[in-house]
Image: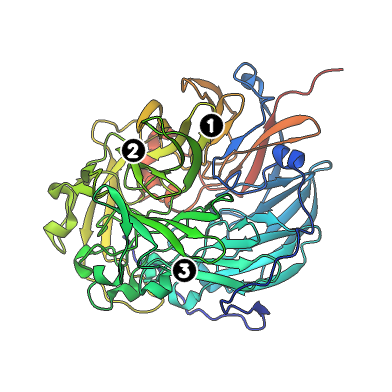
Amino acid sequence: MRALALRPFSLFAGLGLAACASAPLPPAASDPDPVPDAVAARGWLLPTGDAAATRHSPLAQITPANVGRLEPVWRFATGAARGQEGGPLVVGSTMYLHTPFPNTVTALDLAERRVLWSYTPLQDPGVVSLMCCDVVSRGLAYGRGKVFLQQADATLLALDARTGVPLWRASNGDPRTGATATHAPQLFDRYVVTGIAGGEYGVRGYLSAFDADTGHLAWRGYSIGPDADMKMDPERSRTWQDGRMVPVGRDSSLRSWQGDQWRLGGGTTWGWYSYDPALRLVYYGSGNPGTWNPLQRPGDNRWSMSLWARDIDTGTVRWVYQMTPHDEWDYDGVNEAILFDGPDAGGRARRMLAHFDRNGFAYTLDRESGELLAAEKFDPSVNWATHVDPASGRPVVADLYSPARRGEDATTVGVCPPAIGSKNQAPAAYDPALGLAFVPTNHLCMDIEPFKVEYRAGQPYVGASIVMQPVPGDEAALGAVVAWDPVHGRAAWRQPEAAPVWSGVLSTASGLVFYGTLDGRLKALDAKTGAQLWVSPPLPSGVVGNVTSWEFGGRQYVGVLTGVGGLANDPDGIGGLRKAAAPTGPSRGELVVFALPEPRP
């Protein structure tokens, strides 16, 4: 990995940050601006589509029979370059758009397609040099009459949804230590839930919940460290072991680290969050331990690389499950947890979640108890582990692909998947009628070489270099969209792609699956069969954004942000590998919107 160029970082003074001391909150006022259910059903109110993170639209005007007639109907230039991740929010007649750094927020009137307001927060440009993998932002949150932005400099910002006027700001991290933010916050109940990035700088990860009306910090739970920091109850917080759920025990994290290495332990939380209002639990994943060099941090390194369920009111851990103990490959566990209900493989009714990890395994858990129900490879090339032991929940690591066994300054060749995973952060979709998840995947391998690294605050703390390559014999298919049955742990179909699929997927009630490609196309598949039904005309650039759908004026629209940056366009990485996909270069970002032709009078 190439060294990251860094500049001195200074925080702006006088930002009027909200107080961040954690304390019980007073009773919440009623929502001052509730969104009617009918309006919500026609819009896109959360970055994940809904609190369950299904990215499934109930709209059905566009069908498998007529999707071939889709045509571009309007475009909007975001005014920013680099990677355009995430997607817009649509609330009634207003669309809210975001950009990568400097994180401009724009409100559009959908009736006249004009700008209502635009706001660019003041941030020190020095934060750009601290951001690991491009200066992206993955979206906004909306609710209680506000739009919430997680700025690159780790400041959480609340804007008045009607005027764009800032209402409050709260600091969620110190960029001088390497703490930054690229993710979309989420509004669950009265809380704005947000995480932190910076695992490659030795940042110890955490999840925070802020009061949506005041910006007051309600709680913060760390991924690693003492029980009190993690909000872990040794007797009541539970994990999977020996085929059953057991208490985590005292010092469950500290016992798995050597000395004070846990203080630089990573476990950052820059992915997606979901929420079950009936259980009042928030779900998310934690990322890689610091450093990437596994020989510098013996032990399981709990609770990096884990799935979490926390009480939304207190932050207390209900359960936690570690997917990749003692990670040796940078398989961040931050991908979304999709919530769904139904019978398990044995016919028992359960509340479940599905998680498609970067390590190449698809996990299905009982989201109420934390029980492991299934763990299977969703990409057939995965070789770093032979399988996940169902009783212990631990992967069985293949010695041939273990950098820790080879040692420092030795290269482990042909590890599949690479550090970006069999699936990166681009979110999957889930169709409840079909019981299938639609997963954007990478089909790649890597060579990895760990080396010793010393910690210095605000400097890269990586400790490994990697070189990615295609899966041998599959050079023409570097990615795929996979339809996955999470109950039975098996694929229903695969649609190969010439390049990795870095677009978030959308499914619709009419049985369609939409996604974008790095060569600048929007595609529609039949959700039941995977058959390709439609390909858009060339887009202004490749797609790393998430496909969104909404209805306005009786017409269903499908939109996606275009604009490639970071690893997806790096000539020494994905950009160099995806030549077969006729890659498009970077461009100014644009939202491109499609719809069926209007009926002729």
User: Residue visible at 45% across and 61% down?
Assistant: 269
Task: Point out the tag, 1 or 3, that comes first from the N-terminus.
Answer: 3
Task: Judge depth for marks 2 and 3 and give the one in front.
Answer: 3
Q: Nearer the viewer, residue 507 or 542?
A: 507
> Identity of the amino acid at label 1?
Pro
Relative to 21, 450 lies left or right? left
The answer to which image quadrant residue 222 occupies is bottom left
- Give neighbour class at mark 3: few <14, some 14-19, many 20+ (Cα, 10 Å): many
Q: CA distance from mark 1 to mark 3?
A: 32 Å
Residue designated by label 3: 221
User: Residue visible at 25% across and 60% down?
Assistant: 326
Q: Nearer the viewer, residue 474 or 348?
A: 348
Q: Which mark is residue 443?
A: 2
Q: Nearer the viewer, residue 118 or 368?
A: 368
Q: CA distance from mark 2 to mark 3?
A: 34 Å
> Identity of the amino acid at label 2?
His
User: Residue visible at 63% across and 83% down?
Assistant: 13
Residue 371 on image: x %, y %? 36, 47
Q: CA distance from mark 1 to mark 2?
A: 26 Å
Residue 186 on image: x %, y %? 59, 56
